[in-house]
Structure formats: C-alpha cells, structure tokens
Image (cartoon, rainbow, N blue to C red):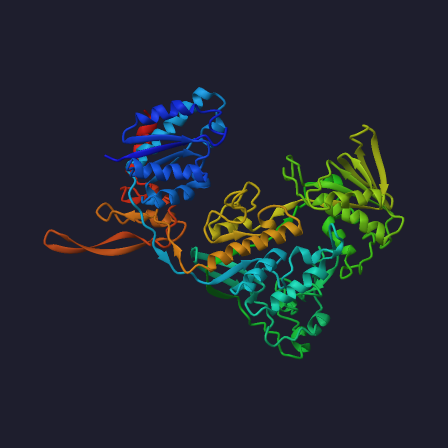
Amino acid sequence: MKRIGVFICWCGSNIAATVDIEKAMAAARTMPGVVHVDQNKYTCSGIGQAMIRGAIKEHKLDRVVVSACSPRMHENTFRKTVEAAGLNPYYLEIANIREQCSWVHKDKEAGTDKAISLIRTAVAKASRNEALFATEMPIERRALVIGGGIAGIQAALDIADAGYEVDVVEKEPSIGGRMAQLDKTFPTLDCSACILTPKMVDVSQHEKINLITYSEIEKVEGYVGNFTVTIRNKARSVDMEKCTGCGDCTAKCPSKVESEFDVGLVKRKAIYTPFPQAVPNKPAIDRANCRWFKSGKCKVCQKVCPADAIDYEQEDRLVTARYGAIVVASGFDTHKLDKYGEYAYGKHPDVITSLEFERLLNASGPTGGKILRPSNGQTPKNVAFIQCVGSRDKAKGNPYCAKVCCMYTAKHAILLSEKIPGAKAFVFYIDVRTPGKDYEEFYNRAYEEYGATYIKGSVSKVFPDGEQLIVRSVDALSGALIELVVDMVVLATSVDARSDAKELAQKLSITTNAHNFFNEAHPKLRPVETHTAGIFLAGACQGPKDIPETVAQASAAAAKVTVLLNKKSLLSNPSVAEVNLKLCSGDMSCMVVCPYGAITEKMIEERRGRDMIKRRVADVNSALCQGCGACTVACRPGAINLKGFTNEQILAEVDAICL
C-alpha cells in the first residue's frame, strides 16, 4: 500500500477564499493510501517546502500530492522539493485547485466540493505513479535567429558576444527590417538609420555571426539542443563572392517595379539593393519582374557588370544545419486597408499610411526627406492624422491596440512642424495611450510645444473637394459635427502578425494566438520562451512592440539561449511514449500524427509456432518525443502508453472524479 501525503495550499486568499481548507483536509484523510494531510498559506515558500520535506521523512511518505496552483507554475519547484527528501521527482502529483477551482467558482460550497474531487483524482493517479528517470543529451552549441530586423540583430549580437556561433536567416536581400524604413524614433527623435546601421555593420563583421539573407526556413526537425533546420537559400542571380556592389547593373536595368521598401511611392529596378545602407550591400534580381526571366530578352545587367557577377543559372539551394536553440524574430506586417473605403485610401493619392509618411520624412526616401503631396508635389499646410485605423475595431479590423500608433503619430506631428514651419497637424483619436518612459512628456510636446490639435472622435469619411480633402468627424467631447479641410491625410495603421506566421509556427511546432502572433509559454514568468523547449521569441512577432521593448526582449531571449548553450548537456523529458510490442499491430497511425517525427517503423523477429517471422512495429525515439500524447490517442489497439500518463493512470483519475 502506498503512503501518500496531501498538502493543501491557501495561496494567500486565492484558494482559501473559495475553498474550505479544513473540510478539504478532512476529506483527504479518508482517501485510500493517504496517511498524512497538512496545509500552508504559501506552500511554494521556503517554509512550505520545508514542511513537505519534513513530512516525507517523518511519515515515510512515498507519494506526494500538492493541492495548489497550476503545475505550469510550480511543478518543477515541488519536484525538486520531493527529490531533496529522497523521493523520485515523478512521485509528485499536482491538484490544480486554484485555476481549475477557486478562480472559476464564486460559491464556496461548490468550490470546496470541486477541490475535494480534484484532490481525490490526484491521489488516485499518485498511487499509480512510477519512478521515471531523465537521460542526458548533448547540445549543439550554435544558435539560429529567424529574422534580421532590430530584434534579430540584437539577439544575434548578444549570443555571439557570449562566444557562440549564430546564423541569421532573413527573407529579404538585406537585414534591417522595419526599423530601416523609419526616419526618426520616439521619444528621443534620434535618427533611426544612425542607431540601426552601426548594429547592422557589427552583425556583418562579427566573426561568430553568419548572415544568410534572401532565404527562408524550409523545415525544422529535432528537439531542444539538437534542432536540424533546412534553409532555402533563394537564387539571387548574383555571385556574392564576385560582386563588388558597384551599382552599375542597377543603374542600367531597364525594368522598373514598385519599391517594397518605399511602400510603392517610387519604383525600383528589377535588379536592386533595397536601400542605400543595405547589409549586404549587394543586389538581387527580382525574377518575377526581370525581362530576361520573363521573355528571354535583355541581359543588360550581365553586359555592364565589370566583375562578371551576374549568374542567371543560379538555383535555390537547400542548406541543412544543426542548432541548439532558435530565436524567432520574424517581425510584423502593417494592416491592409482594403476594407476602409471611407478614408479614400487607394482612391486619392494624398491619403497615405503612416509608413508611407515615414518614407516621405526620410532623407533616403523618394522625396529626399521633403514632405510633398503625392498628387501635385506641393508642400501641405494642413495634415490630418487619423488614429486607430485597423486597431480596436472588432467590426473589420483588429480588436487589440497596436500600442505604437499614438506615439508615432505624435512624432509625425512634431516632425511635420519642424520640416514645414507653420504647418498644422490635426490628430483624430479615440484615446491617447503613452505606455513608456518619457512617452507622456513626448506626447505633451506634440500639442503644447508644436501646436498639434487633438480631436477626440472617430472619422466617418474622407472625400476630395477640388485639390483638397474634407475630413468629416464628430467631436466626442462637445458633440459638434466637424468638417476639416486639409491637404493630406495620414492613416495610423495597425500592426498585424506576419502573413506567413501561421506557416512558420507549424514548421517550428509552436502556437499562435487568435491574431496569429506567436504564443509565449507564460505571459509573466516565461515571456520569451515558447511551449517548445529551445525556441524563444523576440520582438513584434509575439505582439505589437516599440523599439526599446523589442530590443529588451531580444536581449532577454539571447540570455535564455546563452544559458541553454552554456550547459554541458540537457536532461531529457522522461514522460515519453513507449510501445507494447505484443499489442502493436504495425498500422503506423501513431507515426502519422506525431508532430515531432519521433516515431518510425522497425521490423522485429518473433516465433510463431516453429517458424520465425518478421513483423512491423512502431519504434519511439525518446530523444525526439516531447510527451504530447497524440500517438496514444491514435493507436487503435492501445499499444502505446505515455510514461507518467498511462492509460491506467488516466482511467484511475476518471474513476476517482466520478465518485
């Protein structure tokens, strides 16, 4: 007979307010195998853990049930506690009576009854828990960073400075990301390129960093410490070794298409370098718009190239490499405005997005830093800025706040006044949100020092009136109808997850939220980790962020990677699938559903009567298995069990909770 100890936590008032602790303790004492019951206000505290260790030794306990908060919070804490007392850490069971009970029940009697049921369930499973043992795994001391924006750059530099090799994979021909498109940054108004370009150069020159631009992640296999990643290196049609970056090919190229970097405000060539400070500063051929690839005629770039670097025969290359850890820093997209016809975007050239306005402000932009109306090239005197376009809009946009729009609009209002003395900025807003150090002061400068007019109210329509635009709204504070005559309208567009985020998440075996931003393991305690061990998040791929927050998170992710790569080895998760070969039918349905590629088929020999026959069965690679349990559900004959969560253990829990 097992000797089980039950320890019930008050969690301050979190549990005690909706669970009668004394009643729960009395019920626990009547449960099969329970020989000791105790309680503590804060069981996870040093005093609470000492109480458990003492009880294990005094009462010769061989199983422990802690009734407290979610195992996601403190399972490892209590496993270490019971291990310190001489028990196998997997003899511990957690009854989650906080999140699953007290947090969802107002009625104390109902909450207490449910808590007792959960404790009974945990006791039933604990009595069937077996000792499990982790094995050591080697670590590949190399990191992969997906994305070459400021988040990826910062993470790569920090990891490399710690002495580990890093590969940075970037989809575009150059690193730099969204920050490279900006003019100034809030709240200091320092030049974006001035602070970004040195970091880009540092990345390109760092002996521990390998830049893999114009490339995408094709496939990710393996597990923490030992990921195998296949990278598609897209055909650049330019020999990077030979190319000197002289620019002759770009100058002579006859094909022009809209520039993605300049958000379609100007055209670029079919062979192009995205922007002047690009790293690497070497061109790529856009095959979809190149005359040679479309019609078989041209080859001008090849004829004028003094280094003979143009190579039309180049093909995509698949490169496979091993990594111990992965940082995802894939960035964000700006919200598409095809559903916002009331603002006349796409219909009138003087209605532009905030990112397009950034390019007009930028000295390397299409107008050399001059703010000019796209319709006639004249200087605007009155500009309306419309906030929350695609944000906080459940009907046709995003329900969440994009977090940065209020601040970059304040920045735009200030820069408008600096570049065009006497120009007037009108900001239409729902609420002004300034969540950051010196942000409120920066916003105050916009309207106090630079005279921006803030109007609380949603804009209902923007329409042309001759050479000008009419902005129609209602002042929410006075109720007055407003029709404002302006020269230009700037739409503060929301921040979206990348269009390919879902696809990348599937390759990485990580999850996304309802808006396709990548999910962190815990919003407070593990904000840069994912549920897949060894994969970390940095920047706006996790959710809307400004530059300071992005850089901080990138350094945090790099610190996690450094801690991981600094270990001599890793302990495997012992809760892995195991196959009962006598029951296995060999239909391999388990292999089909395994998301980690941990199950393969193998042939075994067995005796049937006088004959030896070969039979196909499933084989689990315990190093790859993450203990998700998908295979146990798919197995028709019930031949697969998950250690620590066997069918017998689960059924014992079901029986106990039904009592």
Percent position of residue 511, x then y: 50, 46
In the image, is 656 to the left or to the right of 13? left
Find residue 156 and report its image quarter: bottom right
Q: Considering the image in quadrants, where does the C terminus appear?
A: top left
Q: Relative to 206, is 579 above or below?
A: above
Q: Considering the image in quadrants, where does the N terminus appear?
A: top left
Q: Is residue 347 visible?
A: no
**Which residue lies at the image location 63% right of the left edge and 37% below the top edge?**
399
Percent position of residue 239, x then y: 59, 73
**Which residue lies at the image location 49% right of the left edge and 58% below the top edge?**
218
Q: Relative to 208, is 227 above or below?
A: above
In the image, is 546 to the left or to the right of 170? right
Which of the two residues, 108 or 370, is positioned nearer the viewer here? Answer: 108
Find residue 269 and report its image quarter: bottom right
Percent position of residue 33, x then y: 27, 31
Q: Relative to 590, is 141 above or below?
A: below
**Which residue lies at the image location 55% right of the left edge and 50% below the top edge?**
501
Outermost residue toward the left?
610
Percent position of residue 292, x then y: 63, 69
How many labels, in total? 0
Q: Relative to 350, is 167 above or below?
A: below
Find residue 288 and report its image quarter: bottom right
Outermost residue toward the right?
422
Which of the two residues, 492 or 438, is positioned nearer the viewer here? Answer: 438
Q: Is residue 392 visible?
A: yes
